[in-house]
Image: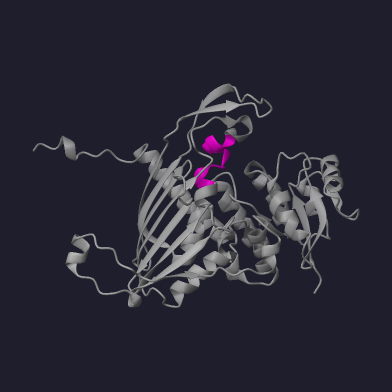
Amino acid sequence: MAPIRVGLIGLSANGATSWASKTHLPYLLSTSKYELVALCNSSVASAEKAIQHFKLPATVKAYGSPQDLAQDPDVDLAVCATGVEHHFSSLVPLVKAGKDVFTEVPLAMNIDQARELWSLAQQHKVRTMIGMQGQANPAVKVIKNAIESGKIGKVLSITITGYAEAYTGDPNPESSVHLFQRAQGANMMTVWFLHTFNFILHTLGELASFDSMLGISHPEIALFDPKDPTKKTQRTITSDTPDQIFLQGKLVSNALLSFHMEGGAPFPGEPGLRWHIVGEKGELLITNNMMMMDVLHTSAKVQWLDYSRRAKSAVNDVLNDKPQSIPVTELEVPKDELSKVGDMAENVGRLYEAFADGENGMYADWEVGLRRHELMEEMFQRWDGQGNFGREAKYMKADI
């Protein structure tokens, strides 16, 4: 079968944009299922510089605008790996030209743009993909298979805690200012939460009801010039994006879910992600160094507790704090050829593989992406109406 011909937007030679070079390019250069035929940057000169910098074949074409890329008949799939501020303007001409499209998260800067993009994709009957790697992640597959095969029986509850280490309250480089400005579209909710919550819902099913609470623990953000080795604060801004995300709800399956993502780093020795699933017949405990396990899962550990193997306990055992010795089984997360691609590129590569092989359930399309954006929009709207950290507790004001 002929390879899918790719036009890649956002592969920069100057290092300002590194995601495309760390994730998309390593896979595209390692596979026979795709052929990189074009690069598109802010100018033809910039695209030509990237072609030379990454030593790409001389046959790779250079474009200075998405509109020009859209007119290339040799491009089957356009990949948008730019900052989110360029997603909408880049994707619209490509979709209208009938190109299949793969875009990084978030889909767009705001919900109106996201809705319009999905509407256009439907109108022009193009295939779409968004860079949430959960559906193709081997660790997520192991967890999902364990649940669906009945290892823990009916799921009763899920507890997820973790950390988005970029939001520590420490000074930040000026180049990251957009992470603290909600209108810019890329923040802890639309990147860290979106990546993480997508693979949770993919594994366990959608929400039937929920309450959420968002808050800002570090409102004042100091910014420094990244070229200044002393990292002296140049200015201070006020953040309007959450660095604390709480969500509690009930899934369609009736399982209860509790989720907390916090800006900052975990306690030393503790994982960045702790995901505990309790069922009628057993439990699963998943840990990973990074909360966004779909992005990088090389440290993922999946443990299974089978209730049928534990000894019966008496009430006095619990009251006396008597420990139980219960066998726990670690479920293997398999490796494959894509494991050799390495680091964050391997799960991006698995999305490409699923797309090429027509395995629709193994990658998220824009319909799934829009559904996740609708959830985040609902959470933002509730936050706007209730204020920082939710509604006031009134019980202490009661006349007792």
Q: Residue furthest left?
A: 400
220 to 214, vertically: above or below: above
Left or right: residue 399 versus residue 111 is left
Q: Main secondary structure of the magenta part?
A: helix
Per the image, is 35 magenta? no
**Where on the picture, by quarter, is residue 86?**
top right
Q: Position of residue 228 (x, y in %)?
A: 67, 25
> Where does the magenta region start and end?
178-190
Q: Residue furthest right?
A: 58
Left or right: residue 288 versus residue 399 is right
15 to 306, vertically: above or below: above
The number of numbered badges drawn on the structure is: 0
**Where on the picture, by quarter, is residue 29?**
bottom right
127 to 153, vertically: above or below: above
Q: Position of residue 201 (x, y in %)?
A: 46, 62
176 to 79, vertically: above or below: above
Q: Position of residue 273 (x, y in %)?
A: 47, 53
**Where on the picture, by quarter, is residue 399?**
top left
From this viewpoint, is residue 345 visible? yes
Q: Residue at x 56, y 52 (%)?
A: 115
Q: Residue at x 53, y 42 (%)?
A: 187
Left or right: residue 118 versus residue 256 is right
Taking depth in this image into account, of 190 and 139 the one nearest to the observer is: 139
Q: Position of residue 73 (x, y in %)?
A: 83, 60
Per the image, is 182 magenta? yes
